[in-house]
């Protein structure tokens, strides 16, 4: 170690070390106010700590704060997900930072910090089980990144399990029932919409979603070139309609697994043929690049307009469930589960690689089906 006196009267303590990656000699330094025996001792400790951080590739004592970790991880994470996932993650982390200080050092994080946080928001708090689980999964993802970067040696969140509260467990069956529509409820809605010519497009969309399990954005993005007469090529989702440029941007699907070919039952094929006739009569042409499910304005019916119609339908048809565009996707999973199709084939059809909701609906429906079998056997006379 050597000392250099600076023009401002302070002292720079310097030391050389070998870079572990290039093996070239580099220099580190710290600046202190004095050049005394005590200052030299302090400088030596600081320099050794710096060199240790720079040369130990397995080091897990880097002083990075929780917020710094979040910014570093999020910069990479947002390049791998859709914009709305990034927005959701920002909201999740805002909740985390309202309880765990941003300046908390990552190396000091332990399981108790996160157990206390989850108790605060869920066990003794008012957040739902599903949202609390989403928060936990986000933290787990971020801390796995910290392990990869060797900021910490292990992830303190990975072994934490959130146990559903008793009152939520008791209401679980009812909640699962409300996630999808029964066949008679679907038919009731479709018949109601078909009474008026102005709502027949909505009827076709609902039935097509139910028969295919598409996300609404995937249905919006369908073009006639994606239909080969027997199946549809799901290869994108639709962005927001730009009022200024009068254009719509077709983007990639939600995940890689969402890119798929969906074979169509005859009724779904009939719906497309009916839609082709409707489009030609209304717009004068049906071109390969045209979107399939067009409104009277000549653009795909927006999800907001569709969901507004569903809110009205919920009352008009006396449906005791919250109607949204996504409920028909869940209803498709329910339909396939009732047909005793394997879970893997259902996941492939709806484009899920990690299908928590699909699995829940599948298990729920198959349990109900098994119960109906026993009831039938018990009632044999």
Image: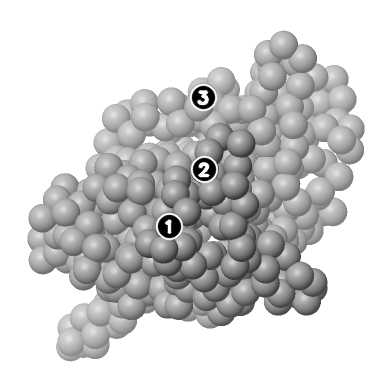
Q: Is residue 48 above or below residue 220?
A: below
Question: Residue at position x 59%, y 47% from top?
Answer: 5
**Of the numbered discs in the image, which one, if any, rests on residue 67?**
none
> Is 128 positioned to the left or the right of 153 in the image?
left
Q: Check disc 2: other Cα within 10 Å, few if <14, some if 14-19, many if 20+.
A: some
Residue beneath label 3, please? 305
Where residue 103 appears, x then y in whole percent? Answer: 35, 48
Mark 1 vs 3, N-terminal side: 1
Relative to 325, is 24 above or below? Answer: below
Local secondary structure at mark 3 = helix
Front tag of 2 and 1: 1
Quick check: marks 1 and 3 in contact, CB under 8 Å?
Answer: no
Residue under the point 22% across and 68% down = 112
Q: Residue under circle 1?
A: 36
* Mark 1 to mark 3 CA distance (whole Å): 75 Å
Q: Is residue 61 above or below residue 91?
A: below
Question: Percent position (x, y) of residue 82?
Answer: 61, 45
Placement of the C terminus among the 4 image quadrants: bottom left
Q: What SS does tag 1 mark?
A: loop
């Amino acid at each position: 170690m050597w000392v250099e006196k600076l023009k401002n009267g302070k002292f720079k303590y310097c030391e050389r070390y070998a870079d572990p990656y290039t093996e070239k000699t580099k220099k580190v330094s710290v600046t202190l106010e004095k050049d005394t025996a005590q200052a030299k001792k302090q400088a030596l400790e600081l320099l050794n700590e710096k060199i240790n951080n720079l040369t130990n590739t397995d080091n897990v004592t880097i002083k990075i704060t929780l917020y710094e970790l979040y910014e570093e991880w999020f910069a990479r994470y947002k390049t791998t997900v859709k914009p709305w996932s990034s927005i959701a993650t920002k909201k999740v982390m805002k909740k985390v930072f309202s309880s765990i200080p941003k300046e908390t050092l990552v190396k000091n994080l332990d399981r108790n910090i996160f157990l206390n946080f989850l108790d605060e928001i869920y066990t003794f708090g008012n957040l739902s089980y599903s949202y609390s689980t989403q928060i936990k999964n986000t933290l787990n993802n971020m801390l796995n990144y910290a392990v990869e970067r060797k900021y910490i040696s292990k992830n303190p969140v990975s072994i934490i399990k959130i146990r559903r509260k008793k009152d939520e467990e008791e209401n679980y069956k009812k909640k699962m029932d409300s996630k999808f529509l029964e066949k008679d409820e679907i038919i009731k809605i479709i018949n109601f919409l078909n009474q008026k010519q102005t709502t027949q497009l909505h009827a076709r969309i609902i039935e097509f979603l139910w028969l295919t399990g598409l996300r609404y954005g995937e249905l919006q993005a369908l073009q006639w070139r994606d239909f080969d007469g027997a199946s549809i090529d799901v290869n994108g989702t639709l962005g927001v309609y730009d009022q200024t440029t009068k254009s719509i941007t077709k983007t990639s699907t939600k995940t890689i697994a969402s890119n798929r070919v969906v074979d169509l039952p005859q009724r779904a094929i009939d719906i497309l043929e009916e839609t082709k006739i409707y489009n030609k009569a209304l717009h004068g042409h049906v071109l390969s690049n045209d979107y399939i499910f067009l409104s009277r304005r000549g653009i795909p019916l927006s999800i907001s307009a569709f969901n507004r119609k569903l809110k009205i339908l919920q009352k008009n048809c006396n449906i005791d469930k919250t109607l949204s565009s996504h409920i028909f996707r869940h209803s498709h999973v329910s339909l396939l589960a009732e047909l005793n199709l394997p879970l893997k084939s259902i996941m492939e059809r709806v484009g899920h690689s990690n299908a928590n909701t699909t699995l829940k609906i599948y298990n729920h429906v198959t349990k109900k089906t098994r119960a109906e079998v026993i009831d039938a056997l018990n009632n044999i006379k």
